[in-house]
């Protein structure tokens, strides 16, 4: 597939998707489709261990959904538009590989919802985060009312979504929305360094750990523990587990193959 709204690069086990609609990188239906296709490609590529998602330039990660496209849609058309974002963000959240959002500048609405679907959020110091939807007479529709409360708690999520308040990077870090705040000029370097650390870890164990966590938060404790046990057994049965345990006993560095 030829990509027009995103850029896809792969190097040393790390894939980088760059939202490429500068300067504000608004999210439209074509971008959702292309992003979803790229995530499918990465899911099937065993050489890729980690995904980084970022925006072109430092002015904005993504300023939200493309209002110029959605403003005059019929209810049926806006349903399809919204399902495009939901399906793509679900693919990102459920990708069996770690996903890092490297966000800079304006990260509003759908842009923040995209970042929330990732495992980690590295934020440049110039990040501004907001959910402005209620001020436009709508609500977040890309998972914001679901993922944000689960990440920072219901009360804080209501404050941000009801009031549309804009917060800076430091506040976002204190609330637990972002993982780490860094200088603008080292954002990608920091994200790439962290991705490199994750890329050398055993991929079956990483996949099972993510799957257990993702499923567990939506289950009762007993069911979550049972699911964890299934994931544990799957990881234990992998060749990488045998290699890792053997290397530990033999006091040598493991050589993982991703199997």
Image (cartoon, rainbow, N blue to C red):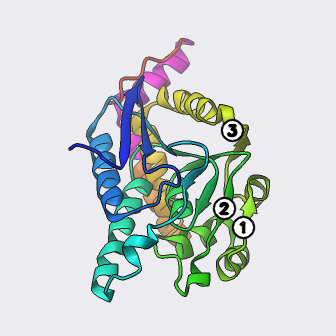
Estimate the x, y position of residue 148 in percent, counting from the top left.
60, 68
Residue 171 lies, in percent from the top left, at 78, 58
How much space separates mark 3 and mark 1, taking CA atoms? Answer: 19 Å
Label 2 secondary element? strand
What is the spatial separation of the Cα atoms under label 1 and label 2, in whole angstroms? 6 Å
Camera-side residue of 200 and 179: 179
Look at mark 3 in the image and give the residue it sits on: 184
Determine crowd level at label 1: few under 14, some 14-19, many 20+ residues with C-alpha closer than 10 A.
some
Secondary structure type for disc 3: helix
Q: Earlier in the sequence, mark 3 or mark 1?
A: 1
Q: For mark 1, what is the residue?
A: 166
Q: Nearest the camera: 17 or 227? A: 17
For this rendering, which residue is in front, 82 or 185? Answer: 185
- Are dots 3 and 1 in contact, CB under 8 Å? no
Residue at image mark 2: 129
Q: Is residue 189 above or below residue 119?
A: above
Mark 2, residues whose alpha carbon is within 10 Å: few (<14), some, or many (≥20)? many
In primary-sequence order, the first of circles 1 and 2 is 2
Gap in angstroms between the C-alphas marked 3 and 2: 15 Å
Q: Which residues make up the magenta segment? A: 233-251
Horizontally, residue 141 falls left or right of residue 39, namely right
Q: Residue furthest left?
A: 1
Q: Earlier in the sequence, mark 3 or mark 2?
A: 2
How many discs mark residues in the rendered view? 3
Q: Secondary structure at mark 1?
A: loop
Residue at screen point 69% across, 72% down: 153
Whether the magenta-drawn stretch holds residue 243 is answered as: yes
Q: Residue at x 43, y 53 (%)?
A: 211
């Amino acid at each position: 597939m030829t990509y027009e709204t995103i850029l896809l690069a792969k190097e040393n086990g790390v894939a980088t998707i760059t939202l490429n609609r500068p300067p504000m990188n608004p999210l439209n239906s074509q971008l959702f489709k292309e992003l979803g296709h790229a995530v499918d490609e990465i899911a099937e590529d065993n050489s890729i261990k980690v995904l980084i998602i970022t925006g072109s330039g430092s002015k904005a990660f993504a300023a939200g959904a493309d209002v110029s496209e959605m403003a005059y849609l019929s209810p049926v058309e806006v349903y399809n538009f919204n399902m495009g974002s939901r399906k793509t963000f679900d693919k990102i959240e459920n990708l069996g590989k770690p996903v890092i959002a490297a966000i800079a500048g304006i990260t509003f609405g759908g842009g923040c919802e995209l970042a929330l679907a990732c495992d980690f959020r590295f934020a440049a110091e110039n990040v501004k985060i907001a959910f402005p939807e209620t001020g436009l007479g709508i609500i977040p529709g890309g998972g914001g009312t679901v993922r944000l409360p689960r990440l920072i708690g219901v009360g804080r999520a209501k404050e941000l979504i009801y009031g549309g308040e804009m917060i800076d990077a430091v506040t976002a870090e204190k609330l637990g929305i972002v993982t780490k705040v860094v200088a603008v000029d080292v954002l990608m370097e920091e994200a790439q360094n962290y991705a490199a650390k994750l890329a050398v870890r055993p991929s079956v164990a990483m996949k099972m750990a993510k799957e257990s966590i993702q499923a567990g938060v939506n289950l009762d404790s007993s069911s979550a523990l049972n699911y964890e046990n299934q994931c544990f057994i799957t990881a234990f049965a992998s060749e990488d587990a045998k290699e890792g345990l053997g290397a530990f006993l033999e006091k040598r560095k493991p050589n993982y193959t991703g199997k």
